[in-house]
Structure formats: structure tokens, C-alpha cells
């Protein structure tokens, strides 16, 4: 073959940009097709907090030109809240596993700016593809001009998220599963008011805020609170409810003022006053509808491969989706480098055989954690079992219990 092999990556979010780094590093020419018109501007409310585990941090350290996100390490603490008495106490705690919290927009921007210019085609909507033994041809609409172009390559990487059109091509009947609850979430920026009553109050109830990620468990519900860089507090509150209606394919519900008001009232009943106040003071909270899907039976076909949420839509309780995306990209790059484009099928099979067992178990364990914390596994349902939780129940809450948390199968000893 003349020149470098070429990969067409569909989707320019975390997985797509991670693959651009990994495949670029493996000697591939990459083009990323992303329908959004550009990077979310700095300070925009797009995205919220995410957690990076130590494997992801090691990988990112090799890709990012700026490393600020990767410093520090946070323990995770699960605590119970007695909603009537408005008190909370510690149930379980994970320490020393190199966990970091970051803002989605910060990670996305750092991945983007560490890539060669012109890698990403913003405002390009992938429409369809054809495969042959020679390679892949993608039809892509340039949104601004309404024109359609063809892009040819040796490999098509589906990084187009949990509603992936490319996954649908191979698994037309595969469905996302609504988890039975949705999440209110938001980020409070306190950079201009570090010593306000609300921040001081929060620090009293959550004394390790900034140095710890808190999970609060109450009657049939739970909440996650942590501080992210640049004086922001991220919170997520999971609420059991029938599947909300959303517009088109969106995973986010547009919220009205009356919905926000009701959420504030419910928060006062469920949580300690300081947490309810955090929710009240947050501008533009939004609702994420929670889905995952049963694990797929395969992730690759001759010259097409699924990565990230396209490959394994997951619930957020195991803090997995971003970490799985980064590891998918990393393993794919290594398998491609090792086998070369002449053995593309072999490389993709290796990727699939390394990642499928890991992501399948992690998706199912995350689902289990969500059901546990939302009270689905107790009788009567949503009763509050944490008051008398014994050592075994407490241990079940630990993030370390995630399958493959310590050791992830990798091609060769690439992360040692
Ligand atoms: C705007 C945004 C904000 C997010 N914020 C958070 C957050 O705060 N915390 C968190 O944990 N997770 C967040 N996520 C989700 C998180 O990125 C993913 O769960 C995880 O990192 C896996 O990412 P992914 O790249 O596989 O999927 P996604 O992040 O869903 O990205 C899929 C990408 O593919 C693009 N795409 C889809 N179809 C097409 C098409 N036909 N043509 C061209 N492009 C297409 C989408 O525009 C999107 O950019 C966010 C995702 C997005 C898109």
C-alpha cells in the first residue's frame, strides 16, 4: 500500500477524539466527521463532570499537551442520608486508586487542541457508508451548504454515541433500555463567591469536598456531588420516574420553570438543607434520561469498528463511559499498530476480544449499582436499607468492586 492507511472516525466527542490520538499515534491518517458546528465555547454549560480512573489518566498523559486535568486523586465516599432527621453518615469509602474529576468540556477541549489542526471536520453529518474489500466509503453532508461529499478510507470507526447509526446498521433491532430513573444535574460556579453561605454550608456537611467525591443515598434515590476544577461543584440527582418524553433523539429533556421549582421542593424533602440549597442555587439545571443497553455480541466487521458509547451504552454509576471510551481507543490503536493495515481484520478481532468481555461486565455491573442505589433491589421496593447496612452491603457499594477495576486485559504490556 502507498502512503498511510486512513481511518474515517464518525463522532468528535470523547471517543472520536481519543481514537484520533490513538490511531494517529499508530501511523494512521485520521479524519473525524462531527455534526456539531464546533467546540463548545469555554464556559458554556455543555457537559458537566466526569471521572477519570488511573488507566485513563495514564493514557491521557501521553496524548495531552496540557496535563492539568491529571493531577491529584480523589477518594470516593458513599454515605446515607436520613431524610427525616436530615443527617448523613458514612457507609463505605474507596481510597488511593488514582481517581480524578474533570469537566467534560475541559477534557474535550484538551483532546481537541492536542490534535493536529484540520483533523476534525465540524458541521459534517455522516449519512451512510458502503464497504468493499478495498475499503470504506462514507457519505457525509456538509450541514452549512447542504451538499454531500464522499470520504474514502480503509477503516470506519463508529464513535457516534449511544444512538449510533452505524451500530443500528449491524443490529437494527438492538434497543436502548430506559433504566427506570432520570437524573437532574447541574454545575454551580462559585468562582466569584468562594465564601458564600451556601459554599461554607456545603463544606460543613461535605468536609472533604474538593478532595473527595460523595455519593449520598436516601430513600429510593441517590445523588452524586463533587468539586471540579475552577471552583465548580457538579451534582447529579437520580429520580425514579416513568420514561420522560424528549425531543427527537435527545437524551436531555428541556426543562420548564415549573419542573425546576418542583425539583427544588422535592430536594428539600429528600436531602440535607445544604444540598437542597446547592440544587436551588444552580443555574440551568437539566435532566438526562438514563439508558443503557444489553452488551453486544460483537464490535467489529472486516473494516468497521464500534467504540465508546456506540459500542456499549452504559449507566453512569460505575463512572465508566468516558473511561471505557479512552481505553477502547487506546487498545484499538495498539492492535492496529501491531497488525498493520494488511491484517486489519486480525487487528479488529484482537480489539474485540480484549474489549468485549471487559465492557460487557462493566455495563452490567454499573446497571446493578444503579438498581441497588435507587432501591430497586429491596423489598418493599425503594425502602431505605442503609440505616442498618452490614459490612457486606457496604462493601457492595465500593467502586473497587467493578469487574476489571484493577487489571484490564491489554495487547502486550502497554500500560505498565
Ligand atoms: C455535548 C456532550 C456533553 C457531554 N457531557 C458529559 C458529562 O458532562 N459527563 C459525562 O460523564 N458524559 C458526558 N457526555 C457523554 C460522554 O461523552 C460519553 O458518555 C462518553 O465519554 C463516551 O463518549 P462517546 O464519544 O462515545 O459518545 P458521545 O459523547 O455521545 O459522542 C458522540 C458524538 O458523535 C456525534 N455524532 C452522532 N451522530 C453523528 C452523525 N451522524 N454524524 C456526525 N457526528 C455524529 C455527536 O454529535 C457526538 O459528538 C457528553 C456528551 C456530549 C456529546
Image (cartoon, rainbow, N blue to C red):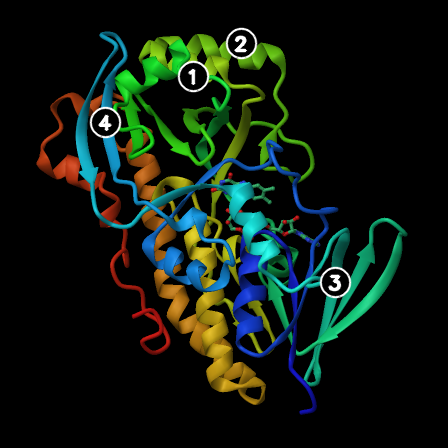
Residue at (61, 12) in percent of width and height? 257
Disc 3 is placed on an element classified as strand
Badge 3 density bin: few <14, some 14–19, many ≥20, Cα 10 Å: some
How far is mark 3 from mark 2, CA to CA? 43 Å
Q: Nearer the viewer, mark 3 or mark 2?
A: 2
In percent of width and height, residue 101 lies at 39, 41
Task: Kindly indicate whether the residue at mark 4 contacts the one at mark 1 (C-beta within 8 angstroms).
Answer: no
Disc 2 is placed on an element classified as helix
Residue at (70, 54) in percent of width and height? 34
**In this picture, residue 67 sits left or right of residue 28:** left
Relative to 286, residue 74 above or below:
below
**Which mark is first along the chain, 2 or 3?**
3
Q: Which residue is identified by label 1?
A: 278
**Which mark is first along the chain, 4 or 3?**
4
Q: Which residue is identified by label 4?
A: 79
Q: Which residue is identified by label 2?
A: 261
* Res 173 visible: no
Q: Residue furthest bottom?
A: 1
**Which mark is first along the chain, 3 or 1?**
3
Task: Kindly indicate whether the residue at mark 2 contacts the one at mark 1 (C-beta within 8 angstroms).
Answer: no
The disc placed on residue 128 is 3
Relative to 57, residue 301 above or below:
below
Residue at (51, 19) in percent of width and height? 282
**Which mark is first along the chain, 4 or 2?**
4
Q: Nearer the viewer, mark 1 or mark 3?
A: 1
Task: Kindly indicate whether the residue at mark 4 contacts the one at mark 3 (C-beta within 8 angstroms).
Answer: no
How far is mark 1 from mark 3, CA to CA? 44 Å
Amino acid at each position: 500500500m502507498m502512503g498511510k492507511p486512513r481511518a474515517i472516525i464518525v463522532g468528535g466527542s470523547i471517543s472520536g477524539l481519543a481514537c484520533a490520538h490513538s490511531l494517529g499515534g499508530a501511523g494512521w491518517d485520521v479524519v473525524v466527521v462531527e455534526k456539531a458546528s464546533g467546540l463548545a465555547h469555554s464556559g458554556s454549560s455543555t457537559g458537566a463532570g466526569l471521572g477519570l480512573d488511573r488507566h485513563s489518566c495514564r493514557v491521557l498523559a501521553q496524548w495531552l499537551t496540557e496535563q492539568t486535568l491529571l493531577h491529584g486523586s480523589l477518594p470516593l465516599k458513599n454515605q446515607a442520608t436520613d431524610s427525616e432527621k436530615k443527617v448523613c453518615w458514612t457507609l463505605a469509602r474507596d481510597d488511593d486508586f488514582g481517581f480524578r474529576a474533570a469537566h467534560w468540556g475541559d477534557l474535550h477541549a484538551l483532546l481537541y487542541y492536542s490534535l493536529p489542526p484540520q483533523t476534525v471536520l465540524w458541521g459534517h453529518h455522516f449519512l451512510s457508508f458502503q464497504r468493499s474489500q478495498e475499503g470504506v466509503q462514507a457519505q457525509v453532508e456538509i450541514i452549512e451548504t447542504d451538499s454531500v461529499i464522499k470520504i474514502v478510507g480503509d477503516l470506519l470507526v463508529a464513535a457516534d454515541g449511544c444512538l449510533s447509526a452505524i451500530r443500528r446498521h449491524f443490529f437494527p433491532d438492538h434497543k436502548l433500555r430506559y433504566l427506570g430513573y432520570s437524573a437532574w444535574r447541574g454545575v454551580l460556579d462559585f468562582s466569584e463567591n468562594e465564601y458564600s453561605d451556601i459554599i461554607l454550608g456545603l463544606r460543613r456537611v461535605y468536609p472533604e469536598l474538593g478532595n473527595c467525591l460523595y455519593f449520598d443515598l436516601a430513600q429510593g434515590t441517590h445523588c452524586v456531588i463533587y468539586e471540579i476544577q475552577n471552583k465548580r461543584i457538579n451534582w447529579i440527582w437520580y429520580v425514579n420516574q416513568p420514561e420522560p418524553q424528549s425531543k427527537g433523539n435527545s437524551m436531555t429533556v428541556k426543562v420548564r420553570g415549573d419542573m425546576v421549582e418542583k425539583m427544588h421542593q422535592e430536594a428539600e424533602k429528600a436531602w440535607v438543607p445544604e444540598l437542597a440549597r446547592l440544587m436551588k442555587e444552580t443555574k440551568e439545571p437539566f435532566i438526562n434520561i438514563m439508558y443503557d443497553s444489553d452488551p453486544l455480541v460483537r464490535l467489529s466487521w472486516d473494516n468497521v469498528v464500534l467504540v465508546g458509547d456506540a459500542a456499549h451504552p452504559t449507566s453512569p454509576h460505575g463512572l465508566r463511559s468516558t473511561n471505557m471510551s479512552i481505553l477502547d481507543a487506546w487498545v484499538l490503536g495498539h492492535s492496529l499498530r501491531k497488525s498493520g493495515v494488511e491484517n486489519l481484520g486480525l487487528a479488529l478481532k484482537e480489539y474485540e476480544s480484549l474489549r468485549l468481555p471487559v465492557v460487557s461486565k462493566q455495563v452490567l455491573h454499573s446497571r446493578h449499582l444503579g438498581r441497588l442505589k435507587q432501591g430497586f433491589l429491596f423489598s418493599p421496593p425503594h425502602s431505605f436499607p442503609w440505616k442498618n447496612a452490614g459490612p457486606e452491603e457496604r462493601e457492595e457499594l465500593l467502586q473497587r468492586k467493578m469487574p476489571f477495576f484493577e487489571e484490564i486485559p491489554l495487547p502486550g504490556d502497554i500500560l505498565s
